[in-house]
Image: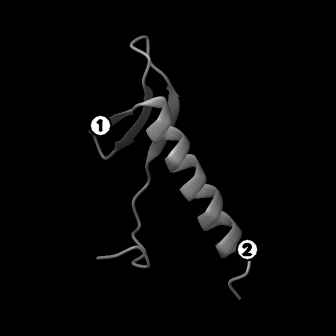
Amino acid sequence: MGINTERDIEANMQIGPTDQGFVRIFIEADGIEIPMDFSPEEAEEIADEIRAAAATAKHVD
């Protein structure tokens, strides 16, 4: 399975700051909860990667 493999799984995602100064991405799907905490600097790097991927995806036919 890779980035281009489609799956029929429904998931919920929440993103927000924690009271410990981290940024949490929280994913819940099929009864599984995955909390991922990142430093603010790591979160900014992830945001940059998402923006770059979105810009590239705009040009896919």
Local secondary structure at mark 1: strand
Residue extending farthest to the bottom is: 61
**Camera-side residue of 4 and 52:** 52
User: From what the image shows, is residue 35 above or below residue 58?
Assistant: above
Quarter holding the C terminus is bottom right
Residue 9 located left or right of residue 31:
right
The residue tagged 2 is 58
Residue 1 is drawn in which quadrant?
bottom left
Say what amino acid the circle numbered 2 marks. Answer: Lys
Residue 21 located left or right of residue 36:
right
At x 44%, y 54%, the residue is 10
Q: Which of marks 2 and 1 is nearer the N terminus?
A: 1
For the residue carrying disc 1, how many other residues have a C-alpha within 10 Å: few (<14), some (14-19), or many (20+)?
A: few
The chosen color scheme is one colour
Residue extending farthest to the front is: 41
Residue 44 located left or right of residue 28:
right
Foreground mark, 2 or 1, reads 2
Q: Marks 2 and 1, Cα distance to the nearest angstrom?
A: 31 Å
- The reply to whether discs 2 and 1 touch (Cβ–Cβ < 8 Å) is no
Residue 3 position, x and y percent, is: 41, 73
Residue 35 is drawn in which quadrant?
top left
At x 39%, y 70%, the residue is 7
User: From what the image shows, is residue 18 above or below residue 59?
Assistant: above
Local secondary structure at mark 2: loop
The residue tagged 1 is 33
Residue 22 position, x and y percent, is: 42, 24
